[in-house]
Amino acid sequence: MARKIKYAATHFSIAFSMSYAVNQNVALSTIVGIAEPIAFAMGRGVSREARRGLPLARAA
């Protein structure tokens, strides 16, 4: 659980900082900062599920 919180905090801070650097709007940057970790978590889950169904190729 601590690892997930650390990832969420890291993604929030980076997304907020980059968004604020681009548009100089705190409200919009906060929304982007909150949405990015949620999208990351959902995308990560979908990616993991998709990889489970793929056959593994043997190494050369």
Image (spheres, grey):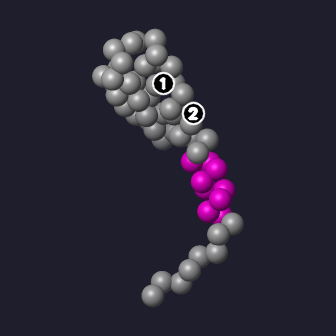
Q: In this view, does 52 lie above or below 26?
A: below
- CA gap, disc 2 to disc 1? 10 Å
- Please tell me which residue is depicted at 65% across the width and 64% down the height of the picture: 52
Q: Determine the main secondary structure of the stretch shown in magenta.
A: helix
Residue 18 in which image quadrant = top left
Task: Identify residue type, mark 1.
Answer: Val
- Please tell me which residue is depicted at 48% across the width and 84% down the height of the picture: 59
One can see residue 1 in this view? no
- Image quarter in which the C terminus is found: bottom left
Q: Is residue 50 magenta?
A: yes
- Tell me the element at label 2: helix
- Please tell me which residue is depicted at 51% across the width and 33% down the height of the picture: 37
In the displayed structure, does residue 23 sit left or right of residue 58?
left
> Which residue is disc 1 drawn over?
32
The residue lying furthest to the right in this view is 53
> Which residue is disc 2 drawn over?
38
